[in-house]
Image (cartoon, rainbow, N blue to C red):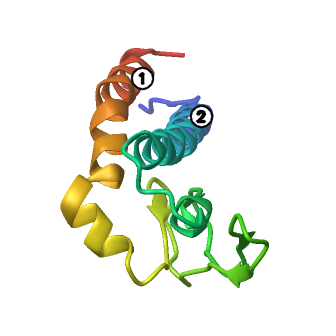
Amino acid sequence: MSIRVTGIQEAVKALEDYKDTKTERLQSAVDESVINVERKAKKKITSDGHIVTGRLRASIHGVATNSQDTSFNYSDQQGNSFEGSTDEGTGKLNGLVVTNVDYGPKIEALDSFMFYGWEQERPEFIKLVKKILSSIR
């Protein structure tokens, strides 16, 4: 007597496709949130009056998932050019919002512009991640 089981390969492929689709959607959510945190941090630093030359604001930038921050050029309001990369990298499901300006941490300690950007974005990010993880397709 024998029993033939078929469809295992198709089931495994369907599970892998499902995982890949979820991962891609989560990466898109992270990348979208990186953009939003960057925008919100820049808005806060501007509205709170920390702009003198514009260098710190211009230096703030996002690093998308699966990326390396190796090249980011920017200028201040006086036209001075700077290289702003941090050489930090991201993984499959994380992104960064960074600045390499040496006085950035001091302003962050005083005013929490980066933390503020994340705190403003976090509820929407959590909602989006829950939606992605709960959808079955």
| Residue 79 as seen in the image, left or right of residue 86 | right
Note whether 94 is above or below 10 in the view shown: below
The structure residue drawn at horizontal position 52% and vertical position 63%, both measured from the top left corner, is: 52
Question: Which amino acid, mark 1?
Answer: Leu
Q: Quadrant of the N terminus?
A: top left
Residue 107: numbered disc? none
Q: Nearer the viewer, residue 84 or 128?
A: 84
> Residue at image x 46%, y 15%?
136
| Residue name at image x 25 percent, y 53 percent | 112
Q: Which mark is residue 128?
A: 1
Q: Residues within 10 Å of mark 2 (few under 14, many from 20)?
A: some
Which x, y percent locates residue 84? 62, 78
What kind of residue is marked 2? Thr
- Identify whether 84 is placed above or below 11: below
Which mark sits nearer the N-terminus, 1 or 2?
2
Identify the secondary structure beneath mark 2. helix
Q: Secondary structure at mark 1?
A: helix
Instruction: Identify whether 92 is placed above or below 3.
Output: below
| Residue 42 image offset from top left, x and y in percent | 50, 47
The answer to whether residue 41 is left or right of residue 76 is left
User: Foreground residue, 126 or 61?
Assistant: 61
- Residue 24 picture location, percent across and down: 60, 40
Question: In the figure, is residue 74 to the left or right of 20?
Answer: right
Disc 1 crowd, CA 10 A, few/some/many (<14, 14-19, 20+): some
Task: Count the labels in the image.
Answer: 2
